[in-house]
Image (spheres, grey):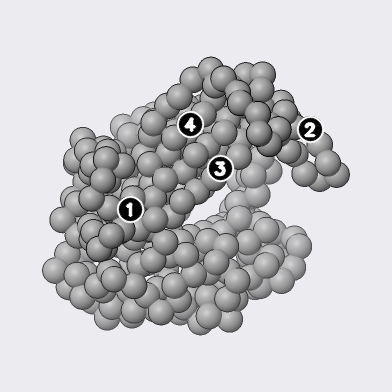
Amino acid sequence: MARIVSLGSALQDIYLIDRDDFGSVEFGNTSMFKNLEIGSKYDIDKLDFYIGGGGTNSAVTFARSGHEAIYFGNLGHDPAGEAVLKKLDEEGIDTSYISFPPRGKTGCSIILLDSKSGERTVLTFRGASARFDNLSPSDLDLVRPDWLYVTTLRGDMGTLLSFFEKAHAIGTKIMFNPGVLELANPKQVLGLLSDVDVLLLNKREASNLIGGSLLDELLNKLRNYCQTVIITDGAMGGIATNGEKAYRFGIYEDVKIKDTTGAGDAFGSGFLASLASGDSFRTALIFASANSTAVVQHRGAKNGIITRNIELHPMPIQLIK
C-alpha cells in the first residue's frame, strides 16, 4: 500500500433537511429555492452533522482502501475541530500535521437540502481553511509520501508552488484537482502542471482553463501539459488518458441521487486509491466511478465511500483508438 498526503480543507457540514419548504423554481438556466422569504421562520424536518472538506474527504477514501493516509490542513480549537479530529481518528488517518492557526475557527458549511429532489444550496464559512500559507512544505521531508493529493487551496498559488516543488524534489507524485480560485489564474495553473502526474477537472473547468468545448479537444490540449488527464462530464461520464491509452467512460450505474456533496472528491480520490494499489488505469477509472456513485446515494460526503474489497461490476468504458 502507498503513503498518501491529502492537502486541502476540513469542514463541519451541517445539513438542514426539509421536504416541502425548500421547493425549487426555475429562472432561465438557474434553479432557486422559492419559498424562503426574508424575515420568515421555517421548521426544518431534520438536522444532521457530518464532516466535509476536500482534504478530509480524500483522506478517508485512501484510508478505507488500506493506504497510509495523512491529512495536511488547518483546524480551530473548537467543537467543530474536535468533531473533525474524532472522525479522522476513527478512520485511522494521521492527524500529526494538522495546524491550528491563532484565533482560527474550523470551517463550516450549512447545506440546505430538499429531501424530495436532492437539490441543495451550500453556505460556507471557510474559517481556518480559508488560508494555507501557514503550512510547511518541509513537512513532506518528514513524511516522504508516495503521493500528494491536492484539492483547492483557495487560490493560494504560492503555497501550491512550494508544495509542488518540494514533492517533485523528493520524488513524490502529485495528483491535482484545482478549484475555482486556482482556475481563475489559468497561466499559473498551466505553469504548475509540469510537476503534476495526474490532473482531474470537470468539463467546464477544463474549458475555462485551456479553451474548447469538446471532450476530445480538451483532452488533447491538456495532455501537452500533464501525462495523465481526467475530465469528467457529470451524467455523461468523461474522458481520460495516461499518455499511453485513452478511454471514454459512462456512469457506473444509474442510481437515485440523495446528495451530491463530495462526489467529485470521491471520484478523484477513488482513482488514486485504486492506482496506488497497483490497479490498471482502466480499473482505477471504474473504481473512481463506483466510489462517486456510492457517495451520492448517502447524505454527507463520507458516508458512502467504498472500501478496497468491493467487487466492481462492469460499466460503459471504451478504449479510444
Q: Earlier in the sequence, mark 4 or mark 2?
A: 4
Task: Check disc 1 and report its element: helix, strand or loop.
Answer: loop
Task: Check disc 2 and report its element: helix, strand or loop.
Answer: strand
Q: Distance between the residues labelled 1 and 3?
A: 18 Å
Q: Which of marks 2 and 3 is nearer the N terminus?
A: 2
Circle 1 or circle 2, nearest the eye: 1
* Circle 1 Cα neighbour tier, 10 Å, few/some/many (<14 / 14–19 / ≥20): many
User: Which residue is tagged 1?
Assistant: 105
User: Which residue is tagged 2?
Assistant: 25
User: Which residue is tagged 4?
Assistant: 15
Residue type at tag 1: Lys
For residue 96, which numbered disc appears in the image? none
Q: Residue at x 74, y 68 (%)?
A: 212
- Give coordinates of residue 37: x percent, y percent: 71, 33
Residue type at tag 4: Tyr
Examine the rendered structure and indicate whether residue 310 appears above or below residue 146.
above
